[in-house]
Image (cartoon, rainbow, N blue to C red):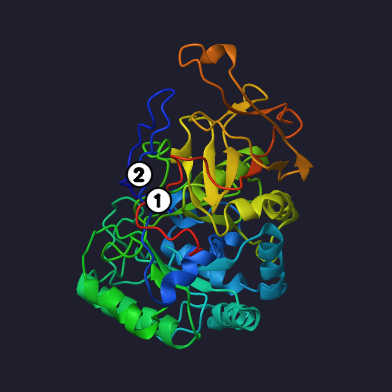
């Protein structure tokens, strides 16, 4: 994986003047496709899987490049590829336990080793002790279970002799036997992508990575769309694709946006050092991951969370346990991000995010809570019911003027005595059910249909 500079355009958002119940600033949300790709808006949380030869040593998915391993030596790992415990259903069971609705697999990472029965190179899973088509096995399981399958493909290739390795970022220095020729390499790439789009049934997406050369060729994505009309395509390939891909926490310039005006899928790994399997990985805290997931989903983005299976094909217990714990949280609060739209323009409180469905508003405490109360200025109407989704218990609400409201001298809705200490390692979500939204703030994001999700 490698981050790509990503800046989302969004509306912004000075809200109502203090104490004046004006209509909220308009939120612009990402448009739907209006075709078979709209599955992506329904299944917004997915599992990313980085797996390949690099799992054998358990160092990093870029072992060959970062550890300066000669190509001829790295290639020998194919003789050891034998993931006898690989069970796609076990992966999908774990994804379901985490609340994930789709999966994306690295069919070929930068090292060039292919996890499918490709006819374009012998450097693939069929010519190993394992001798089985990993992609087909996963595709069959996904089709049987109705799980959209997306396939990752690295444009950079440290093995194919025509790829123009020049020692740029995430490239090898020129190697003996190289015959650099970008056009010939692209012929190889197109043939491989055609195989993936032809031989494995319906696909949910193609996830490009590492277009180091920044080459533009719209015909490649056009081919994918013709072969796989329901496949979403990211923006790291040969044109802008369908959606942007902010990675990890590298970019902070969009942190305070209330929503994304462009289609967005954030990606993150449970491990802080690598995406593939690493024996001595340093793992993110549950708190960090859950807050990351919530802050994107509550603003209308999708989210891919990655694990790296071990050499035998199993997902180790530590990352599995992380996903199960995330699933416990997600299962409790999922109604706040599934079938809802961003609604943070309903309040001037920038310590929380809001989503809504009709007259139900969800309050997401995605940041460190510094007190046990949330004020939702300018809302000044009591909900008919308030519930902490994490626990299922009632939340205490009042409409009152706090001392800090003396300038406006108006009462506002406050949610009090929240269990912020008990739930400090997660994201607390409060469900507020109104008979109807208060007058003057019943506004939906621009161009949206509140019932469409």
- Verify CB contact (< 8 Å) between mark 1 and mark 2: yes
Element on which disc 2 rests: loop
Quarter of the image for residue 217 reads bottom left
Residue 366 position, x and y percent, is: 57, 37
Rendering coords of residue 346 (x, y %): 47, 38
Structural crowding at the residue carrying mark 2, measured as other residues with C-alpha within 10 Å and reported as few (<14), some (14–19) or many (≥20): some
Tell me the SS state at disc 1: loop
Residue 273, located in which quarter of the rendered image?
Answer: top right
Q: Residue at x 42, y 73 (%)?
A: 37
Vertical side of 393 occupied by 111: above or below: below
Residue 244's place in the image compared with 256, above or below, is below
Q: Which residue is mark 1?
A: 445
Residue 429, by quadrant, is: top right
Within 10 Å of disc 1 (Cα), the crowding (few <14, some 14-19, many 20+) is many
Residue 450 makes an appearance in the image: yes
Residue at position x 44%, y 23% in the image: 19
**Disc assigned to residue 159:** none
Q: Position of residue 46 (x, y in %)?
A: 56, 61
Left or right: 117 in relation to 120: right
**Residue pointed to by mark 2:** 26
- Can residue 87 be seen here? The reply is no
In the rendered view, tell whether residue 86 sits above or below residue 382: below
Given residues 83 and 407, the one toward you in this image is 407
Q: Earlier in the sequence, mark 1 or mark 2?
A: 2
């Amino acid at each position: 994986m490698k981050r790509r500079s990503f800046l989302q355009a969004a509306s912004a958002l000075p809200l109502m003047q203090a104490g004046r119940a004006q209509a909220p600033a308009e939120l612009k949300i990402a448009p739907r496709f209006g075709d078979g790709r709209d599955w992506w808006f329904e299944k917004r949380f997915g599992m990313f899987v980085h797996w390949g030869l690099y799992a054998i040593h358990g160092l990093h998915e870029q072992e060959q490049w970062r550890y300066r391993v000669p190509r001829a030596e790295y290639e020998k790992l194919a003789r050891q590829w034998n993931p006898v415990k690989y069970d796609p259903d076990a992966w999908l069971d774990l994804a379901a336990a985490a609340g994930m609705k789709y999966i994306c697999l690295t069919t070929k990472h930068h090292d060039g080793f292919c996890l499918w029965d490709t006819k374009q190179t012998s450097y693939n899973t069929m010519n190993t002790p394992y001798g089985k088509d990993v992609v087909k096995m996963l595709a069959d399981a996904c089709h049987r279970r109705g799980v959209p399958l997306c396939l990752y493909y690295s444009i950079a290739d440290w093995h194919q002799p025509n790829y123009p390795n020049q020692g740029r970022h995430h490239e090898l220095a020129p190697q003996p036997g190289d015959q650099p020729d970008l056009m010939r390499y692209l012929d190889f790439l197109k043939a491989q992508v055609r195989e993936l789009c032809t031989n494995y049934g319906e696909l949910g997406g193609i996830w490009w990575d590492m277009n180091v050369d920044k080459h533009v060729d719209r015909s490649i994505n056009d081919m994918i769309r013709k072969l796989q009309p329901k496949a979403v395509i990211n923006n790291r390939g040969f044109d802008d694709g369908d959606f942007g891909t902010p990675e990890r926490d590298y970019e902070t310039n969009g942190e305070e946006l209330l929503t994304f005006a462009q289609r967005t899928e954030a990606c993150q790994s449970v491990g802080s050092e690598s995406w593939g399997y690493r024996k001595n990985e340093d793992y993110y805290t549950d708190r960090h991951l859950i807050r990351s997931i919530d802050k994107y989903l509550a603003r209308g983005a999708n989210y891919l969370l990655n694990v790296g299976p071990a050499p035998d094909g199993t997902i180790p217990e530590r990352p599995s346990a992380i996903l199960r714990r995330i699933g416990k949280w997600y299962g409790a609060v999922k109604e706040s991000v599934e079938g809802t739209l961003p609604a943070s323009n309903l309040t001037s409180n920038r310590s929380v995010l809001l989503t809504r469905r009709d007259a139900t508003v969800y309050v997401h405490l995605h940041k460190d809570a510094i007190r046990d109360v949330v004020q939702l200025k300018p809302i000044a109407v009591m909900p008919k019911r308030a519930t902490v989704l994490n626990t299922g218990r009632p939340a205490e609400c009042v409409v009152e003027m706090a001392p800090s409201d003396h300038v406006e001298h108006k009462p506002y809705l406050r949610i009090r005595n929240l269990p912020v200490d008990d739930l400090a390692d997660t994201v607390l979500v409060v469900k507020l059910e109104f008979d109807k939204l208060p007058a003057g703030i019943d506004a939906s994001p621009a161009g949206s249909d509140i019932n469409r999700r």
